[in-house]
Amino acid sequence: MADEEKRKDPPWGRPLDPSDMEQEGGAQETRPRETPQEASQDTPPTGTPVPEDIPYYPPPPPPGETGRSEQADTTRASDAPDQAAPAEDTRPSEMPPQQPEETRTSELPAQDTRVTQEAPPAAAQGARADEDVPENIVAQTREGEHPYHWHSGTKREHGSTDAVEFIDVMKSFGRNTILNGLNLGLPENQISMILGPSGTGKSVCIKHMVGLLYPDEGDVLVHGESVPNMADDELFEMRKKFGVLFQDGALFGSMNVFDNTAFPLRQHTDKGEEEIGEIVNRRLKEVGLSGAMDKMPNELSGGMRKRAGFARALVLDPDIVLFDEPDSGLDPVRTALLCELIQEVHAENGGAYTVITHDIMSARRVADFIAVLWKGRIVESGPASELFNSENQFVRQFLSGEAQGPLGME
């Protein structure tokens, strides 16, 4: 009977005796000694007396009070067994109150704000925000700057009609894009200059004008007619409107100066030798080579070869004369003399003269109209007097030859 009464007593009414388990013969699962944390989760049945020598652990908090830890409950229960701790005391007191978002944002360092303000949006940088700029043009651009940041595209009135016009011209060679949406008009009866850094596509423009190259996209108009859409016969006739002075004169080494100058007349006209002789003598006299007609190209100086090439470009009385870097290889004195010659011949014959160069002194001497080409587009264009007073930093740097500015060694 005593054993049965022992087993009827609840486990919390007296200390657990291991003999209880042995007498059951293993029929009841052995229960390990409960820790205070586990005991805190057991509450005595209603009406069962709690002995004074066994501490009472309060029930767990309601579900809403999630910040309470088991360790904090045990500590506070042992310190004050007859009184439960208030719910608010169970929350960690070391956590500082979080600041509002606007307060934390205002405490950011000042330089972060300045960096954000120095990066203008692409829409304000002379290009479309969604524009896909070719990789070779991006490679020429300083880090953090849009490739066409300085391209305002300003086209000032030149007071004349356009002899040659480029409309959204795109031209690439392999993966290298040379002209990237070029828009340019060259005025009639003026000396125009296309200026720009080396390798930016100036000579490619000349080849598009005479139909040696065709644009991948866009159009090139000569006196209002589309060059890419011309048939072969129309293209040959159109080319007679042009005279071209190449960089080194491009004289035939097997011909003397007279025959080099007469070659276009013999090739493209039905004129007799007597008439051809008169025209050649007149043009050579204009360029100061009347006494060198029998000399071979290897007997001429660099300036003389340039003048012989100039005479040959004039014999067909062209409406448009193209000069591809005529000052290349010349000393400053001969460059100045050639510029004077271009002005004199233009004043006598008229027409649209277009000079491709990056020599600023030549531009100051002879240019009526200037277009600044960079990265396949026109930065600015207009009368020479206005561009030399431009507010554009790139134009001002290039036309003054300064080292500091947007143009670097990229």
Image: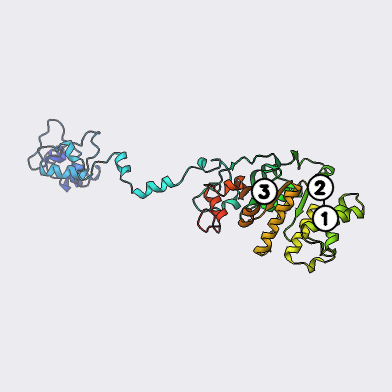
Which amino acid, mark 2?
Lys
Check if mark 2's residue and mark 1's residue have beta carbons within 8 Å. Answer: no
Q: Callout 3: 10 Å neighbours few (<14), some, many (20+)?
A: many
Q: Which of marks 3 and 1 is in front?
A: 1
Which label is found at residue 192? Answer: 3
Location of mark 2 (residue): 240
| Secondary structure state at the residue bearing disc 2 | loop
- On screen, residue 163 versus residue 27, left or right, reads right
Which amino acid, mark 3?
Ser
- On screen, residue 91 versus residue 201, left or right, reads left
361 above or below 23? Answer: below
Q: Quadrant of the N terminus?
A: top left
Residue lying farthest to the bottom in this orientation = 299
- Front-most of residues 259 and 334: 334
For marks 3 and 1, give the CA distance: 25 Å
Which label is found at residue 90? Answer: none
Instruction: Give whichever of discs 2 and 1 has the lower sequence position.
Output: 2
Q: Callout 2: 10 Å neighbours few (<14), some, many (20+)?
A: some
Location of mark 1 (residue): 282
Q: Quadrant of the C terminus?
A: bottom right
The scheme the figure's colours follow is rainbow
- On screen, residue 231 versus residue 83, left or right, reads right
For marks 2 and 1, give the CA distance: 19 Å
Check if mark 3's residue and mark 1's residue have beta carbons within 8 Å. Answer: no
Q: Residue 55 in the image: state x and y as whole percent.
A: 11, 42
Q: Say which residue appears at 52% left-offset and 50% top-offset.
A: 393
Q: Say which residue appears at 56% left-offset and 42% top-offset.
A: 127
- On screen, residue 130 versus residue 288, left or right, reads left
| Secondary structure state at the residue bearing disc 1 | helix
Which amino acid, mark 1?
Arg
